[in-house]
């Protein structure tokens, strides 16, 4: 079994209604666990890109790729090696700001290169785009102040430039 439990698979699919449902249905029927999912159109409006982070403990990676390849609307499938790719995730989080804590929270925002999107006297809405592990760290540091609401996207990933040169 691979050393890394989670693998990133990038698929290019035809941009047609129902394609995502068919892909997700395949994972569900086969008992494959999707840890993260992000979907967006590509620069060619005929295609969309689906980025999956797959838990390979739920099924061998080769089996996941083989099953995806059978779907008619799937144009291309690639596994991205974590050592030669860049992945990021976006977090939006609303945190409580009690009297005396605003400065500390702003220091965290600065340290993590996050952004304050909105604020009032008692709350701040923050955003951070980073590696998933960095988002986990930021979330844990904010938790003692009181997270009101939190939303994270799925991972998006591309091969690093060294691989393409």
Image (cartoon, rainbow, N blue to C red):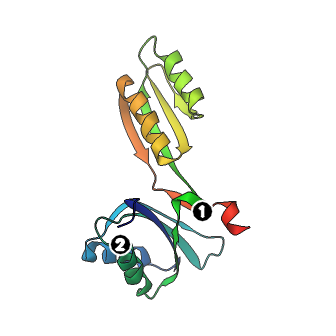
Instruction: Please provide percent x and percent y for residue 114.
Output: 57, 35
Numbered tag placed on residue 134 in the rendering: none
How many neighbours does mark 1 have within 10 angstroms: few (below 14), some (14-19), or many (20 or more)?
A: some
In percent of width and height, residue 16 lies at 49, 80
Query: Do the numbered discs 2 and 1 sit on residues whose CB atoms are within 8 Å?
Result: no
The C terminus - image quarter: bottom right
Q: Which residue is mark 1?
A: 158
Distance from disc 2 to disc 1, alpha carbons, whole Å, reads: 21 Å
Q: Is residue 100 above or below residue 4?
A: above
Point 44% across, 88% down: residue: 72
Where does the image place residue 50, in percent across and percent down from the top left? 49, 69
Q: Secondary structure at mark 2?
A: helix
Above or below: residue 138 compared with residue 19: above
Q: Quadrant of residue 70?
A: bottom left
Measuring from the top left, give residue 55's x and y in whole percent. Answer: 34, 63
Q: Is residue 92 above or below residue 29?
A: above
Q: Residue at x 37, y 37 (%)?
A: 149
Is 127 placed left or right of 161 in the picture?
Answer: left
Foreground residue among 48 and 1: 1
**Eye-nearest disc, 2 or 1:** 1
Q: Is residue 161 above or below residue 138?
A: below
Q: Nearer the viewer, residue 165 or 18?
A: 165
Mark 2, Cα crowd under 10 Å, few <14 / some 14-19 / many 20+, is some
**Looking at the image, is mark 2 or mark 1 earlier in the sequence?**
2
For image coordinates 56% across by 33% down, the residue present is 112
Quarter of the image containing the N terminus? Answer: bottom left
Q: Nearer the viewer, residue 155 or 100?
A: 155
**Mark 2 lies on residue:** 24
């Amino acid at each position: 079994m691979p050393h890394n439990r989670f693998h990133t698979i990038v698929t290019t699919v035809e941009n047609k209604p129902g394609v995502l449902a068919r892909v997700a249905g395949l994972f569900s029927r086969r008992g494959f666990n999707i840890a993260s999912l992000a979907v967006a159109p590509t620069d060619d409006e005929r295609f969309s890109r689906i980025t999956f982070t797959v838990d390979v403990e739920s099924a061998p990676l080769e089996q996941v790729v083989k099953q995806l390849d059978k779907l008619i609307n799937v144009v291309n499938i690639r596994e991205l090696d974590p050592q030669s790719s860049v992945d990021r995730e976006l977090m939006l989080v609303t945190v409580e700001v009690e009297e005396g804590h605003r400065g500390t929270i702003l220091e965290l925002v600065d340290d993590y290169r996050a952004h304050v999107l909105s604020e009032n006297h008692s709350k701040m809405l923050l955003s951070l785009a980073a590696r998933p592990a960095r988002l986990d760290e930021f979330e844990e540091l904010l938790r003692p102040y009181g997270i009101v609401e939190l939303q994270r996207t799925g991972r998006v990933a591309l091969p690093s430039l060294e691989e393409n040169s």
